[in-house]
């Protein structure tokens, strides 16, 4: 009979270990960016959950940008969550971008960098959707 409790404890310990590892510690999400006059798309990813790292690389020039992001508000369904990303690029550009989610998997943010140029990044969007957001923001800036 003294062996019986061990048979129960070992499976429970194993199930607890599996349950603890079933939730992701970090998630990688693809991101796109447009910096400056819009002639180059930057590709990269964020890694984290409510906060984490962000990296982008220009597909033509190879200019690298990196930084961190943090959500400041998380909605229960993912729509309307907000946060900011602080990004620094190899070419000296610095930007703190406020972003908003359109769903739990899509969103975008815009700011001007330290040179006064537009800086947009999107997540969960295609290249063409990112370009359309850029055009829309640039049109509103001119008004």
Image (cartoon, rainbow, N blue to C red):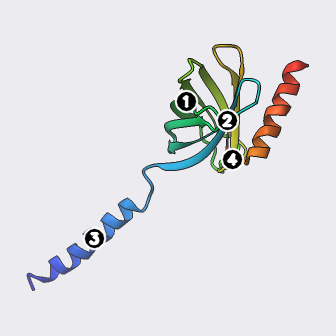
x, y percent for residue 90: 53, 23
Q: Residues within 10 Å of mark 4 (few under 14, many from 20)?
A: some
Q: Nearer the viewer, mark 4 or mark 1?
A: 1
> For numbered disc 4, what is the local secondary structure?
loop
- Residue 14's disc is 3
Q: Which residue is mark 1?
A: 65
Q: Are marks 2 and 1 in contact (CB under 8 Å)?
A: yes
Q: Nearer the viewer, residue 84 or 91?
A: 91
Q: Which residue is mark 4?
A: 106
Reading the chain from its start, which is encountered first: label 3 or label 1? 3
> For numbered disc 1, what is the local secondary structure?
strand
Q: Which residue is mark 2?
A: 33
- Residue 26's disc is none
Going 53% across and 36% down the picture, which residue do you hit?
54
The answer for how far apart the CA atoms under marks 3 and 4 are is 36 Å
Q: Nearer the viewer, mark 2 or mark 4?
A: 2
Reading the chain from its start, which is encountered first: label 2 or label 4? 2
The answer for how far apart the CA atoms under marks 2 and 1 are is 10 Å
Q: Are marks 4 and 1 in contact (CB under 8 Å)?
A: no
Q: Residue lying furthest front in this view?
A: 60
Q: Are marks 2 and 4 in contact (CB under 8 Å)?
A: no
């Amino acid at each position: 009979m003294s062996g019986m409790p061990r048979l129960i404890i070992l499976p429970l310990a194993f199930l607890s270990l599996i349950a603890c590892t079933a939730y992701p510690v970090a998630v990688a999400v693809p991101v796109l960016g447009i910096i400056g006059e819009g002639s180059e798309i930057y590709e990269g990813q964020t890694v984290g959950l409510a906060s984490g790292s962000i990296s982008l690389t220009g597909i033509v020039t190879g200019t690298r940008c990196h930084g961190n992001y943090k959500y400041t508000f998380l909605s229960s369904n993912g729509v309307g969550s907000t946060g900011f990303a602080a990004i620094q690029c190899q070419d000296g550009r610095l930007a703190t971008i406020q972003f908003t989610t359109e769903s739990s998997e899509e969103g975008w943010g815009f700011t001007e960098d330290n040179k006064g140029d537009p800086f947009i990044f999107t997540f969960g969007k295609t290249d063409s959707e990112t370009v359309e957001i850029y055009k829309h923001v640039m049109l509103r800036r001119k008004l």
